[in-house]
Amino acid sequence: MQFRERRRVIQVIRTTYDPDLKRGRSEVVGKIDKAAPAVTDKLQKACTPEELSEIATYLANRRNSLRNEAVRAGAETLPAQMRAAAEYFRTHRDGEAKIFATEIRLAWDELKGALRKAGFSKSKVLKKGGEKAALVDAETVGVNEAKPAAAPTPKAEVASKPAPVKKAAPEKKPAVRKAPVSKRTEAAPVALAAQSPAPVVTVDAAAIKAEKPASGD
């Protein structure tokens, strides 16, 4: 028998050998509801006792598999649920919270007994947790020692304050030499007179003779 799970049902398939085709031929014998898995009357009439035994074994294994997955998920998500419950009880102290607390206490006692029976008592778990943490630390140290020491990364130079910019000295204009001014002295007129050409005087002899007075006898 073969079982094929669909979205809402499980198909029960019988495979028989067909001499004409010279191969196996598959036939859907019946269906089982996944929400309420059970052998229906129609399916029971269509199957042999051996086939019904196979169906019962399949359903039992499927039920155990689903239950194991559910309880595993419960154990995996329980720490988060417990922390959420702790947050709830920090802010709620009413009658509803009291009912929740009673149920949690009973479940907690049952959980502690199961943990001790499984060999996970508080002292052993904490001891193993400490040993595991120490082992992890030792492995981390060994890995770090095995790695070559990395060259020290040069520290980034601290940006110093920019040096004040010196103002450029103004360009000096070439000095214009002034011609020396000679001081006036008493000899200045003489020098000027000496430098200037003498005036040319024209003498009219006839005029001189006319102006000259006649001498007396």
Image (cartoon, rainbow, N blue to C red):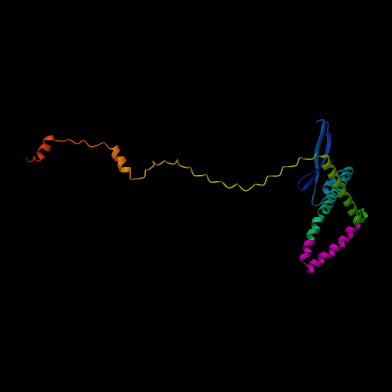
Identify the residue shown where x is 89% and y is 50%: 131
Front-most of 124 and 214?
214
Percent position of residue 118, x then y: 92, 53
**Residue 108 against residue 64 in the figure, above or below:** below
Q: Is the magenta region chiefly helix, strand or loop?
A: helix
Q: Residue furthest bottom?
A: 95
Taking the spot 84% from the left edge, 44% from the top edge, the residue there is 141
Q: Is 83 displayed left or right of 162 in the figure?
A: right
Q: Residue furthest left?
A: 217
- Which percent across, then down, holds residue 144? 82, 42
> Looking at the rendering, which quadrant does residue 121 occupy?
bottom right
Q: Residue furthest front?
A: 217
Q: 44 left or right of 159?
A: right
Q: Is 111 a magenta residue?
A: yes
Lateral position of residue 166 relative to residue 90, left or right: left
Q: Nearer the viewer, residue 55 or 134?
A: 134
Q: Image quarter for residue 208?
A: top left
Magenta region: 86-114
1 on left or right of 8: right
| Place of residue 53 in the rendered image (x, y in percent of width and height, measured from the top left) | 89, 45
Specify whether residue 2 is in view: no
